[in-house]
């Protein structure tokens, strides 16, 4: 059995509780403005584009393309020392938002990644409360 996760964790906020409950079910949900029709991430109760509060939740497809990436060779905190190297990335989701994440399922080498490559969501259960959406090559 693996030891319990000891690394940094996202801090849940009331406006993101729904998001975290859905990730525990291995579902990716986004906020969408009903006025300007923009989907966005991170979850908040107002649209960052137009400022309106007429927003809803949408179930995302979990598909996207790689916008940019970096390979982390040196752990930013001691608890991640056994995880390096790993890939941090920005993924352009099919619904529009750009999503910060990690890429998994591929060796952390530049030759294994290409801007624009197709990706799909996968989930990593860190604790009973936090499940992270990550992305892997299609």
Image: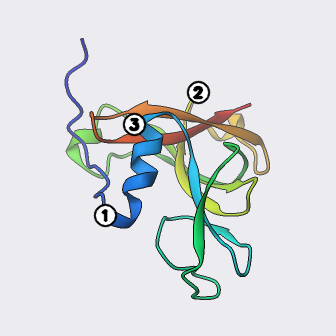
Q: Is residue 138 visible?
A: yes
> What colour scheme governs how the chains and residues are painted in the rendered image of this protein?
rainbow
- Graded by Cα atoms within 10 Å as few (under 14), some (14 to 19) or many (20 or more), the crowding at tag 1 reads few
Return the mark for residue 105.
Answer: 2
Task: List x then y, in percent, for residue 45.
Answer: 47, 74
Q: Tell me which residue sits at (64%, 88%) in the image.
A: 50
Q: Is residue 16 left or right of residue 91?
A: left
Foreground mark, 1 or 2, reads: 1
Among all residues in the image, which is located at the extreme top? 1
**Contact, mark 3 vs mark 1 (Cβ under 8 Å):** no
Q: Quadrant of the C terminus?
A: top right
Q: Across the whole image, how many numbered discs are drawn on residues?
A: 3
Q: Which residue is mark 1?
A: 13
Q: Secondary structure at mark 1?
A: loop
Of 110 and 90, the residue lying toward us:
90
Foreground mark, 2 or 3, reads: 2
Q: Which residue is mark 3?
A: 84
- Graded by Cα atoms within 10 Å as few (under 14), some (14 to 19) or many (20 or more), the crowding at tag 2 reads few
Task: List x then y, in percent, for residue 5.
Answer: 24, 33
Of 110 and 33, the residue lying toward us:
33
Task: List x then y, in percent, for residue 57.
Answer: 58, 59
Q: Is residue 24 left or right of residue 30?
A: left
Q: Quadrant of the N terminus?
A: top left
Q: Is residue 103 left or right of residue 93?
A: left
Q: Tell me which residue sits at (56%, 64%) in the image.
A: 41
Q: Earlier in the sequence, mark 3 or mark 1?
A: 1
Q: Disc 1 to disc 2, how far (Cα)?
A: 30 Å
Q: Which quadrant would residue 137 be assigned to in this image?
A: top right
Q: Secondary structure at mark 3?
A: loop
Among all residues in the image, which is located at the extreme bottom? 51
Q: Disc 2 to disc 3, how far (Cα)?
A: 14 Å
């Amino acid at each position: 059995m693996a030891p319990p996760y000891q690394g940094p964790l996202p801090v849940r906020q009331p406006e993101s509780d729904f998001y975290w409950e859905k990730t525990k079910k291995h579902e990716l949900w986004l906020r969408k403005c009903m006025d300007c029709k923009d989907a966005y991430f991170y979850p908040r109760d107002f649209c960052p584009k137009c400022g309106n509060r007429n927003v809803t939740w949408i179930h995302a497809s979990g598909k996207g393309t790689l916008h940019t990436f970096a390979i982390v060779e040196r752990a930013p905190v001691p608890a991640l020392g056994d995880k390096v190297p790993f890939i941090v990335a920005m993924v352009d989701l099919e619904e529009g938002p750009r999503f910060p994440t990690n890429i998994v399922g591929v060796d952390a080498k530049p030759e294994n990644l290409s801007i624009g490559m197709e990706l799909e969501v996968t989930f990593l259960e860190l604790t009973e409360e936090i499940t992270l959406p990550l992305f892997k090559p299609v």
